[in-house]
Each structure stands twice: as C-alpha cells, then as structure tokens.
Image (cartoon, grey):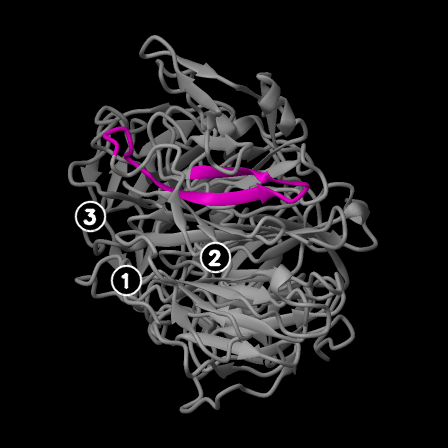
C-alpha cells in the first residue's frame, strides 16, 4: 500500500521504554481542545474499498459480529446493528500516532463479544517513529485504551497477511498472546491486554527475511512469530487452554506447541520443512490442526507451498495439498485457510499468490482428502468458472479494462487473498479479502452441489484509498480524486460509488491534478504505471469536459513518474514537473514539450488562477515565478521560507495571491511570490485549499491542516487567515493526512480531505444540509 511520511510527527521518541508502558486512553468526544471550533459532520465520499484487507475475523460467540483489519486504513466492525456496513473504529488516530492505522492483527473475544483488541503499528523500520501498541476495547471498538509496547509492529510490512498474530484464550479470556516481528519473540498478557511480558522460554523468534540486502529495513526485517492458535477442546471454561500452537517465520522450524498452557514449548515433531506456515486452524471437534504454507511471507509473492493436516492425538502429519509443491502445476503457495465450524470436515484454502490467470479457491468436504476448484481449465485458453461475479455495487472493480482475452477475466476473483473466512454460524456465508476489496457469498454450499456460487463485493462502509491530490472545479463534479494504487475518480455524487476509474490512460497511481482557473472544464492529471507493458501510453492526460473523458498525447523524454502538474488559468498551456527529468511546458496539449529553464528538477508547480501566463514553483525553500507560460522561471527574493518542497496554492479569482504551507508556519504573498509574510498563530501547516466565500465575504474560505494556537487539526478561515476555527474534532483525525485538502467552490463550508488509507473524506457544518 501507498505510504506517506507526515510533516507533523511526534516531537521525539522516549529514550527508553519500559517493558510495558502505562495504559492510556484514546481521545473521546468529551475531551475537546479549547481552541475555537465548529461542529462538522464527517463522512466518506463513497468509493468502496480500494486497498488490501489482510485480515477478517469472525466472533465465534455472537452471530453476525465480524471485524476487518487493513494495512494502512485502520480497523472496522460489522454487526447486526450496522445493516451490513463496516464501521470504522480508528478515526480518532491522529498525526502523532498515525502508525496505529496499520493494524498488524486483530482479535475478537470468544467469551465476551464486547471485547476486541488490535495490535497496531505500521512499520518496524524508521518510517514509523513510534513503537507499536495494543488497543483494547470493552465496547466493540467505540472507545479504546492503549498499552504501548517496547518494540514496533508492522501492519504494512511484508508478511502482514500471515496470522493472526494476536489471539485470545477461548477458555480464559484474560489471557492473550502476541506474536511479534523483528526477533522480539512471543508475548503474553494475563490481564485482558493491559500489561504484557515476553514469554521468555519460547524457543524461536523467527529468522526469515524477504530480502537481506535491503537497506531500508522494509524487506530485511525478521518477520518473526506470525500466528497463535488455541485448541479450545484441550481446556475448560475458566482455566487457561492447555494446547497452544504458534507459527514462526522459519522454514525449518515453522510450528511450535505448548501442552501446559504456555509453561513449556517444543518444536512440533516431524513437522514439514521448507516453507512458512501462513495460516493454521484448529479443529477441536475432530482433533486436527490444518496448516497452509508458502515459500515466502507474501503478500505479493509466493511460488510454492503445501497444505498439511496434523492429527493432534497421534502426531501424524498428512500432506493434503490440492496441488502439492512437488507438482509442476504448483506455482503458488497457500494462504487464506478456513474451516466450516458447522461442518468441520469442510475446509477452504486460497493460492498465495496466483496472479495469472487468477487466484484459485479450493474447497474440500472430506477433511482434505479431495478438493474442488472455484474454476478449472477447459479447452485452453478457456476456463470453466464455478462462480458468477456481480460487481454492480462497485463497478470500478474492472479497473478500467475491457474484457481481456482468455484465460483472464475482468473483474478478477482477487489477489493477495490471505484471509478467507467461512462464517462460524452460517455455512453459506463466506468473506475473503483481496488487494482491492472484500468479496463475499451467501450461497457457498451450492458449490458442493455442482452449482455456481455468486460472489459480490461486501465492502460497504470500508474505505481504504490513499489520496494524493483533490480538486473541486467550480460548476463541475463536486470533487475529483488522485489516488495511490488505484488512479482516482470523478465523484459526480458523494454518496454513490463511481462507475469507473480514470481511463485513457489508466494510471496505477495519479500523483497530481489541476484545472484551469477560469476554464474549469479543462483538467490535467499525471501519474504512474508500468511503462514497459504499455510503451505507447503517456503519464499525462487531458480533459475538456470536467474529467468525464480523457485523451493523451506525448510525454517528455526521461519521465519516470508523475510528479506535479499545473494548468494555465485559461487552459492554454500546462507545466509539468515529472520525476526523472526536469520541468517542462506545453502549449499544444502535450503534442510537444519544451524544457523550462531557471527551475530545479523536482520542484512543485502550480498556476496562477487568473493570469494565464503565470506559473509558480517551490523547491527547498526557494520560490520560483514564470511570467511567460512556464518557459522560464526566476527565483524570487523571498527569504525565510520553509525548507523542503512545501505545498502551496494560488487563490482563485485573485491574480498573484499565494498561500504557502510548511514546517514552522503558514506564509502569504500578494505579489506573485516576490515576498511572503508569515501568519501569526500558525505554528505549522501541512496543506491548504480554498472554497466558496462565507456569506458577506468576498474572500474564499480557506481550509488548512495546521497547528493553530497549539492545537493540531483541520481549520477554516473566513477572513483571509486573520482568525481560524477548528472544524474537525478528536474523534475525526484520520491519522496520516496532509497530501490533499480543498474546499468546495460552490458550497460554503464544505471541505474535502485526503487521507492515507481512509479514502476521500468530506464534511459540512452540522447545521447545514449535506
């Protein structure tokens, strides 16, 4: 998933962290700041998924209660009271602990369904400045208490689909176990997750790393202890469960067991070697443990694997792989393992990973002796599909592609299918996570009768896109989004999922967009995709109908990524600062490009919203101005500006007026960037945007992610920055924000906010109709 490192980080880390830090409480609505504020209603512009869901966890006591975890977008709950919609649970996470939106594992209490726990932390390397934490709730995630851990967790690290790392003892729910990465071993709590200590006698902290040569720490981290599973039948209510199984990222020693409630541990005898145990499920009714393995930790790779069955009484292992690793037809590992708790001889497993032609789901009704496939080969290249897909609720899941040539289909069944779960109370109900959504079915047992099952998106309410830019052209669609890993959408209605991503061309990620200030139907976007597979496509596209349709032309030589782009006020020209080469401009809609002079590579570019000849740039503390349509730039004499490449915007309807954000303040220019004044009271600012003026005002409403009078939040100013009102609250912080914010030019008070993992958020004043 896309990542962004915020400008406003925690001031410093503690020099030393105790074994378990004192518990703290997540902010509540009653604990608001004393800064000027206005109540707003916050909600998502509907997209429907858009990111990887590595974990789905059903509660085994209460029917209908299920949780989902995402790698960068927090955790969600679905129950009978939500009408099938997923409810976000971590929107209170702020910029100081943004990594908590990376959920490494999640556990729902099998004794008391009101209790739920999340192991959080996004990266184990330096990208996340904070350690991980255990979040614990007694009200299904409506409020949380926090126990900080003395190490990091990696909700967006390699191996994040293995698990679950966090598990609750089903016989004594005060006992929890946590498997950790980075060589930190196995940890245990005996007080409902409040305090934790390392299980000192656990013998193996793991040794598998995806790429030992990686210098970033992302792929070179030890993936560690990856899952914990209890054999409920080995204990009785009120006493800790005797038999506990633990998976370890070690190809020679991948599964351990305790038969005395964790007092001692042993390597499970005669276990298979050569692969990593991605998933395990204990069938206490029949005395078996099932294990799915792959040769890598995933989630993007895996080329070999097996499924195994352990008789927990005799210790005998049986390979029950649908396609064993010794077969030439096995080009994938296995993950996504589940059993039907109503009929535990029925189990399912998914490929980890089969990019081409599609993922394969396997199903057995005899404990793994025989398997059927959700699709099989006909006369090559045709496939016989034992399912029907209905994506009418999320039609963009075709990703802008026409029906491809066989054997591929659009939409695909999925990819990165590490969580496949049969509802423990309903054998017909199954959910599985993919790299883009959650799919589900309500007629699963039809498979066993030789009939097709129906698969549909089951993602309503779950929004997981990373937003890189937002524009709201006056008189047009409310908002157009530039998204990482997905491309983006023209949102004609905020309460409806768009039909399609941007096409002609399709970008994997859109990095920047702009519209012409006085001709807003003219729009430009730039982005990224695999150029080697689409050499004739360009990384820049243009629209003259407000983003409904697009066309492409050429791109400058040397471009490697999207960068930033700006449209002249009247749409007569465009300036592009792509990755891989210098700033360029065009006056013929990309038919040809010329190099700009006087501005460094990598500068952020914007246009004046009134004067079509003026463009602006900013790079590492220096502001640049062009008065000839982007052909030449000159460094302004403005000094003491923020270092780095801060965000800045020109004011709609006001020639030469600019606002610049950055660490250390907020700056304003009324002379095309020749000079800037620093705004008092604003200590830091991440980004800024403009919307319709307040009644009685002729200056656009301003919206900024900033720290004002010591309070960090989302603010609005109706008087050109002289005063600010906080419009979000401590329950609506959305973690890592800052890449995108804009007001609506047609609706006073409405703001659009881009998040890194919670999608496109919009808000209106509470006293205003949405």
Residue at far front of view:
314
Separation of residues labelled 1 and 2 (CA atoms): 15 Å
Q: Is residue 420 visible?
A: no
- Inspect the magenta stretch and tell me whether residue 460 lies in it: no
Which class describes the residues within 10 Å of circle 1: few (<14), some (14-19), or many (20+)? Answer: many
Residue nearest the observer in this picture, 98 or 582: 98
Instruction: Please state, as top left, top right, bottom left or bottom right, where the C terminus lies in the image.
Output: top right
Q: Which percent across, then down, holds residue 349?
A: 47, 39
Disc on the earlier residue, 1 or 2: 2
Bounds of the magenta span?
327-350
Disc on the earlier residue, 1 or 3: 1
Q: Is residue 400 left or right of residue 282?
A: left
Residue 660 lies, with reference to residue 586, above or below; the image says: below
| Secondary element at tag 3 | loop
Number of the front mark, 3 or 2: 2
Q: Which percent across, then down, holds residue 101?
A: 53, 62
Q: Which residue is mark 3?
A: 582
Disc on the earlier residue, 3 or 2: 2
Residue at far top of view:
379
| Secondary element at tag 2 | loop
Q: Which residue is mark 2?
A: 163
Q: Main secondary structure of the magenta part?
A: strand
Residue 198 lies, with reference to residue 322, above or below; the image says: below
- Residue at 21% across / 66% down in the picture? 215
Pointers 3 and 2 in contact (C-beta within 8 Å): no
Q: Is residue 395 left or right of residue 274?
A: right
Q: Which residue is mark 1?
A: 208
């Amino acid at each position: 998933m896309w990542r962004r490192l915020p400008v406003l980080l925690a001031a410093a880390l503690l020099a030393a962290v105790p074994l378990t830090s004192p518990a703290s409480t997540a902010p509540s609505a009653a604990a608001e700041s004393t800064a000027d504020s206005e109540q707003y209603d916050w909600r998502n512009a509907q997209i429907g998924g858009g990111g990887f869901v590595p974990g789905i966890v059903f509660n085994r006591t209460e029917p209908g209660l299920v949780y989902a975890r995402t790698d960068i977008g927090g955790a969600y709950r679905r129950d009978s009271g939500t009408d099938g919609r997923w409810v976000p649970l971590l929107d209170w996470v702020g910029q100081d602990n943004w990594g908590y939106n990376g959920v490494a594992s999640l556990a729902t209490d099998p004794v008391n369904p009101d209790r739920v726990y999340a192991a959080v932390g996004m990266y184990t390397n330096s990208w996340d400045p904070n350690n991980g934490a255990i979040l614990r709730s007694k009200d299904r995630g409506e409020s949380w208490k926090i126990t900080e851990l003395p190490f990091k967790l990696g909700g967006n690290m390699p191996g994040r689909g293995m698990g679950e790392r966090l598990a609750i003892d089903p016989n004594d729910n005060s006992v929890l176990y946590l498997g950790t990465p980075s060589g930190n071993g196995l940890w245990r709590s005996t007080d409902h997750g409040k305090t934790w200590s390392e299980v000192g006698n656990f013998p193996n902290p793991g040794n598998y790393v995806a790429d030992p040569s990686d210098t970033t720490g992302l792929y070179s981290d030890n993936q560690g202890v990856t899952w914990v599973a209890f054999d409920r039948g080995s204990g009785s209510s009120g006493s800790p469960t005797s038999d506990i199984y633990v998976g370890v990222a070690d190809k020679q020693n991948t599964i351990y067991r305790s038969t005395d409630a964790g007092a001692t541990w042993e390597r499970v005898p005669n276990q298979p070697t050569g692969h990593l145990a991605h998933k395990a499920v204990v069938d206490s009714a029949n005395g078996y443990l099932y294990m799915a393995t792959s040769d890598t930790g995933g989630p993007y790779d895996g080329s070999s694997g097996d499924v195994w069955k352990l008789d927990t009484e005799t210790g005998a292992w049986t390979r029950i792989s649908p396609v064993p690793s010794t077969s030439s037809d096995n080009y994938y590992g296995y993950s996504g393992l589940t059993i039907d708790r109503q009929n535990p001889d029925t189990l399912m497993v998914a490929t980890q990973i089969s990019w081409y032609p599609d993922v394969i789901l396997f199903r057995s009704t005899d404990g793994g002796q025989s398997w059927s496939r959700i699709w099989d080969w006909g006369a090559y290249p045709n496939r016989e599909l034992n399912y029907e897909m209905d994506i009418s609720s999320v039609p963009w899941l075709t990703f802008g592609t026409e029906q491809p040539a066989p054997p591929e289909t659009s939409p695909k069944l999925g990819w990165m299918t590490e969580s496949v779960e049969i509802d423990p109370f309903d054998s017909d109900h199954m959910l599985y996570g993919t790299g883009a959504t959650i799919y589900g079915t309500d007629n699963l047992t039809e498979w066993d009768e030789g009939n097709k099952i129906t698969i549909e998106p089951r993602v309503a309410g779950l929004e997981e896109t990373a937003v890189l830019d937002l524009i709201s052209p006056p008189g047009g669609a409310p908002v157009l989004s530039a998204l990482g890993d997905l491309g983006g959408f023209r949102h004609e209605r905020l309460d409806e999922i768009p039909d399609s991503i941007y096409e002609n061309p399709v970008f994997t990620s859109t990095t920047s967009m702009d519209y012409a200030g006085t001709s807003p139907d003219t729009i430009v976007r730039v982005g990224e995709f695999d150029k080697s597979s689409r050499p004739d496509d360009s990384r820049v596209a243009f629209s003259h109908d407000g983003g409904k349709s697009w066309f492409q032309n050429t791109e400058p030589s040397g471009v490697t990524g999207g960068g930033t782009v700006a449209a002249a006020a009247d749409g007569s020209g465009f300036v592009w600062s792509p990755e891989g080469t210098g700033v360029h401009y065009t006056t013929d809609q990309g038919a040809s490009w010329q190099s700009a002079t006087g501005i460094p590579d990598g500068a952020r570019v914007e246009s004046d919203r009134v004067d079509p000849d003026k463009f602006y740039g900013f790079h590492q503390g220096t502001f640049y101005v062009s008065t000839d349509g982007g052909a030449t730039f000159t460094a302004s004499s403005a000094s003491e500006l923020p270092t780095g490449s801060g965000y800045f915007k020109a004011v709609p309807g006001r020639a030469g007026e600019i606002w610049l954000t950055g660490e250390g303040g907020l700056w304003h220019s009324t002379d095309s960037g020749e000079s800037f004044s620093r705004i008092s009271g604003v200590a830091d600012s991440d980004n800024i945007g403009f919307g319709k003026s307040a009644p009685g005002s002729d200056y656009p409403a301003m919206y900024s992610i900033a720290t004002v009078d010591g309070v960090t939040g989302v603010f609005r100013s109706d008087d050109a920055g002289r005063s600010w009102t906080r419009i979000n609250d401590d329950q609506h912080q959305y973690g890592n924000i800052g890449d995108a914010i804009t007001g609506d030019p047609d609706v006073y008070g409405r703001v659009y906010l881009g998040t890194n993992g919670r999608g496109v958020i919009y808000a209106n004043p509470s006293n205003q109709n949405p």
